[in-house]
Image (tube, rainbow, N blue to C red):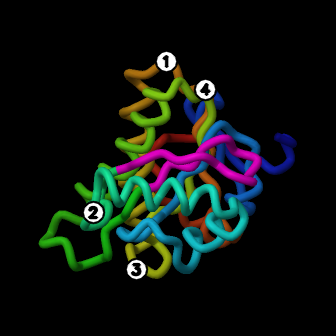
Amino acid sequence: MKEQNVIASFLNGRVRIVVGNITQQQVDAIVNAANPSLMGGGGVDGAIHRAGGPAILEECREIRRTRYPNGLPTGEAVITTGGNLPARYVIHTVGPVWGRSGGRDAELLAACYRNSLALAVAHRLRTVAIPSISTGAYGYPREQAAIVSSQVIAEFLASDRWLQEVRLVFYTQDDARVFLENQKFGTK
């Protein structure tokens, strides 16, 4: 990855903040902010399915058929091929819809990040790119999401030595700015 794309880094370079397109990240896995159906949709989910091609949808259908016939529960994570993406794998996780989780929004959002990172480690992946989960159509306030995600990632990396890089990918400069102003990693 070109260093000029990194706008900030934390935790001795293990966390990098970039502005860009999640589907173009050259990492072992990208995380998909999926909907429970796993069948694609709008936003990040739709973009990943379009860029990755039919192999992703095929594996998602199999996951629905064999493991989650009622849809992927909020906070859980599953892994599929990356299809035509530069990333070898896609880790799908369903974030909470803001205000519809009975006061468990932060807990469920934290589970998305924690379970996605744990799945990456379980598959011996070294680099993961993650979008800002639930802050788009699901309405999670970006400021609060920055706090939750940065705390969970810092806690996870404190006890894990396998992952080399967690790349947080923001679609706009403004999204990255809001994250940087609210993150809990510490100074750059």
Residue 134 figure quarter: bottom left
State how far apart marks 3 and 1 are (Cα): 33 Å
Q: Is residue 145 above or below residue 84?
A: below
Mark 4 is on which residue type? Gln
Picture residue at 38% right of the left edge, 49% below the top: 77
Mark yes or no: residue 188 visible: no
At 40% from the left edge and 80% from the top edge, which residue is drawn? 139
| Relative vertical location of residue 142 with respect to residue 157 in this rendering, above or below | below
Provide the residue designation for mark 4. Answer: 164
Q: Which residue is mark 2?
A: 69
Tag 4, which secondary structure?
Answer: loop
Find out whether the residues at labels 3 and 1 contact each other: C-beta distance under 8 Å. no
Between 81 and 4, the one nearer to me in the picture: 81
Q: Position of residue 180 (x, y in %)?
A: 57, 56
State the quadrant of the N terminus. Answer: top right
Closer-to-camera residue (59/151): 59
Q: Earlier in the sequence, mark 2 or mark 1?
A: 2
Label 2 to label 1: alpha-carbon separation: 35 Å
**Mark 1: few/some/many CA within 10 Å (<14, 14-19, 20+):** few
Between the C-alphas of marks 4 and 1, the distance is 7 Å
Please state which amino acid type lies under the numbered disc 3. Answer: Gly
Q: Where are the magenta residues, as a range?
A: 77-92
Q: Which mark is residue 139?
A: 3
CA distance for labels 4 and 3: 30 Å
**Mark 2 or mark 4: whose residue is earlier in sequence:** 2
Question: Is residue 158 part of the magenta span, yes or no?
Answer: no
Q: Which residue is mark 1?
A: 161
First of labels 3, 1 by sequence position: 3
Q: Given contact means CB atoms under 8 Å apart, are the residues at marks 4 and 3 in contact?
A: no
